[in-house]
Image (tube, coloured by chain):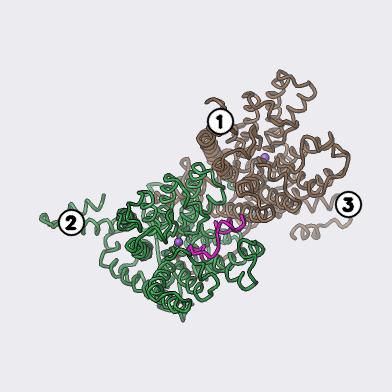
Chain colours: A green, B brown
Amino acid sequence: MRAQGLQARAPHRAMSWYGRVRDAIDGLARSSPARFAILVFTALILLFTLLFSLPISSATRTVTNLHDALFTAVSVICVTGLSTVDMATHWSGFGNSLVFIGVNIGGIGVLTLASILGMAISRRLGLRARLMAASDTNPSRIHVGPVNEGQAVRLGEVGNLLLTVIVSALAIEAIVAAMLFPRMLIDGVALGDALWHSVYYSAMAFTNTGFNPNAQGLTPFENDYWFLGALMIGVFLGSLGFPVIYAFARGWRNPRRWSVHVKLTLLTTLLLMVAGMVLYIILEFDNPETFGDLDASDTVFQSLFLSVMTRSGGFSTIDVSELHGSSLLVSDMLMFIGGGSASTGGGIKVTTLAVLFLAAFAEARGKVSMEAFGRRIPRDILRLAVSVVLWGATTVAVASILILQITHAPLDHVLFDVISAFATCGLSTGLTQDLPPSGVIIMAATMFMGRVGTVTLAAALAASTSRQLFKRPEERPIVG
Amino acid sequence: MRAQGLQARAPHRAMSWYGRVRDAIDGLARSSPARFAILVFTALILLFTLLFSLPISSATRTVTNLHDALFTAVSVICVTGLSTVDMATHWSGFGNSLVFIGVNIGGIGVLTLASILGMAISRRLGLRARLMAASDTNPSRIHVGPVNEGQAVRLGEVGNLLLTVIVSALAIEAIVAAMLFPRMLIDGVALGDALWHSVYYSAMAFTNTGFNPNAQGLTPFENDYWFLGALMIGVFLGSLGFPVIYAFARGWRNPRRWSVHVKLTLLTTLLLMVAGMVLYIILEFDNPETFGDLDASDTVFQSLFLSVMTRSGGFSTIDVSELHGSSLLVSDMLMFIGGGSASTGGGIKVTTLAVLFLAAFAEARGKVSMEAFGRRIPRDILRLAVSVVLWGATTVAVASILILQITHAPLDHVLFDVISAFATCGLSTGLTQDLPPSGVIIMAATMFMGRVGTVTLAAALAASTSRQLFKRPEERPIVG
Ligand SMILES: [K+]
Ligand SMILES: [K+]
């Protein structure tokens, strides 16, 4: 709406087609970064749906079903890692390249967009200052009314941010690939395959996607601590989020200067990682289908691996459907929480959960304000956190009810795959691969809602504002 | 702690045993109404566990297992309606009388205690004024620091409130029984049975318990709209909560003067009732095991009945385990939300849900404060609502993981029965009856946490306070 207005007001009547489009994008990015993000994701998904459905993309050189092409496009661009076709055999070399390029565009895109959205509404001017701010002090969304032009994000600034994100992402991916490559050679993988697979795996790890380049998946490496450890590092760094990575890069020797956001993300992520590991050990150590035959150290390592992957890595060394129902429920919760803000991880984000608990702690201790790491947390952020959780719970509930009614599959599998889709985790009980076309579309929509929804929701809400002309009398309902 | 302090400070050294106990109770009720409520419930449960385990209580005149006696006591006092023994055949006449007396004590007890807790922390003096306040204006918990003696609830006032609650409860139960009694005579039930069963059913309805006095359960009445309608009225009124009933009694002709609490409870309850009904119709109309053979009007009526009963009535005309997985999930959500505050219904309470959504709406519209019915809702109540939801979600999660690990039963049944226990709803897939003793204890604990926990938590939190000596610098993490 506003973008068109800006465009119409532009003085150059004889403007070129390219100039108009650029101005329209510029205007939209300025006036509504959230809508801009949705537009970018939708355009990418449509483009990749088209590309995946081309005969050249499939191994058999035939047209791929529209719902499978759409699902794969959403799964790739939203870095989910779920699939309705066999990813290792269905696609041609061209198709596989699309997957590789798609997850990198999706991963870097979400880091960039989430960072923009997180900072677009900041009071500070200048994106560089805001970027620094995000990594060691007051980073984000403040209710300041409609974004005015001085505060809005410009395409030039977006370019700078994008460059920083791309350099960081490629650097981390290169390091992870360098860890994987010699190992694959030692394991006897041919040079060409080792090169391609190590790059592919490292991209799948850092972008928290979780596709495998080979038909056997992780089976050849299931006891390789070095290989799995490298994947874990990639997934862990990707799921922390760009503000945290930026803070590491700028001042890893000086943790005291890290912002509350960085500390809160790290603490919550580590707590969830350890809690998940301990629960998996307790619940699965005697399950013969999963960790029952492993010795103590292997059980600990595999439990840690599984716990990290629920953050939203999506790699798996075991058949998820063989997990006990209790472990599946634990995984549901871990996946729903997901990764860090402005990360390639999904879910409601670890800081959202942390804010809810900080509110409950403050309430229990009778404190007026939430506190963390010696800082007060503004109370209006609780409303944002509640909104994000309601959005997530509603999406998961609606999708689960629809999939249950379509398939009559057991709840543990349906809930697991739906939450995996919402949180763009990619672990699966196998249900997703057997869905009818209607179910495939619902799962694709769930992935989109999970990825684009949670990233844009908070920004859209924080940007919205309306004047209150008078103050109403206050009245208190009873809760609980 | 404080109660003992008060007692120790009492001037009468030669005080009688009775006097000391009375003073101790008085002191505890004053200093910590939440702890007082927990104490009352625990004492009642222990007493009824003892009584149920006596040989005189069972039909076979044998000692009932401790875990079954405990479970029944918790189920009765917490007006849940779940059972691990066959309620219609296991107990003697004496045992059945215990059940009847127990649910009335439990139901009236929870109405009274929740009303006390809801008002104990109010700024206003005098319980009568507070009671009126609760029914048509600013009713409840305000952060005012530790409850001082002038504001605390005294036993005399509790007596008055208790009397009002008892009179209201008995009046409603009498009306429902009067609707049921002639109908049972017409249906050919013998006079004595009809009298006892109509009184029993009406108590089970108003207290939202849901036990049946006869082995066939509701089967003889499954097509009797009058009978089921009377039960629905009883359950509906019971689940609204005492402040709402009191507001009805005082000014049903003048809805404009109702408090926000009353309006919010009614609106949310009606919305949930209709939403549940519509979803059950859509999901179950072609399920041959439930509503598949019914005509349109019967399907609507039975769906409405099921929807009302998830509020936490617990009566059922169908075999719950035959519902589709989708309907079970819908029921899980409806049961988790539960009834109104200070009601015999369980769950997190409808106003808690309403406050969460009001916060999200306010956030979406960019309003500084939550609003409902032309009133501002104080923002600190959101923290209370978040705390109650976290308490509920944590209880359900922990209980579900434990029951899943003990039984390896399917998630849809485990989640349903655990939420039914937490929300003291009493509907069951049949899982609870087949649990081993360890599972029975976990379910009993879940009922206790759900009933006593949610009722006391909000009051305990609102009463807690601590001085903040200095204001910390503010800093904002990113959420979502
Ligand atoms: K993933
Ligand atoms: K009940």
Outermost residue, top side: B186
- Specify start and end residues of the magenta stretch as a single range: A309-332
The quadrant of the image that shows the C terminus of chain B is bottom left
x then y, percent, for residue A133? 38, 71
Q: Is residue A331 magenta?
A: yes
Chain under callout 2:
A
Instruction: Decide whether the magenta segment is chiefly helix, strand or loop.
Output: helix
Q: Are marks 1 and 3 in contact (CB under 8 Å)?
A: no
How crowded pointer 3 is (Cα within 10 Å; few <14, some 14-19, many 20+) is rated as: few
Q: Nearer the viewer, residue B95 or A146?
A: B95
- Residue A330 in view: yes
At 77% from the left and 45% from the top, the residue drawn is B73
Gap between marks 3 and 2 measured at Cα: 92 Å
Q: Secondary structure at mark 1?
A: loop
Circle 3 sits on which residue? B16
**Residue placed furthest toward the front:** A60
Q: Which residue is mark 1?
A: B292
* Mark 2: amino acid: Arg
Circle 3 chain: B
Residue A107 at x, y percent in the picture: 38, 64
Residue type at mark 3 is Ser
Residue at figure coordinates x 81%, y 60% from the top left: B8
Q: CA distance from mark 1 to mark 3?
A: 67 Å
Q: Is mark 1 within 8 Å of ligand 2?
A: no
Name the residue that disc number 2 marks. A20
Ligand 2 is found in the corner quadrant, namely top right
Mark 3 vs mark 2: give the one in front. Answer: 2
Nearest the eye: A381 or B301:
B301
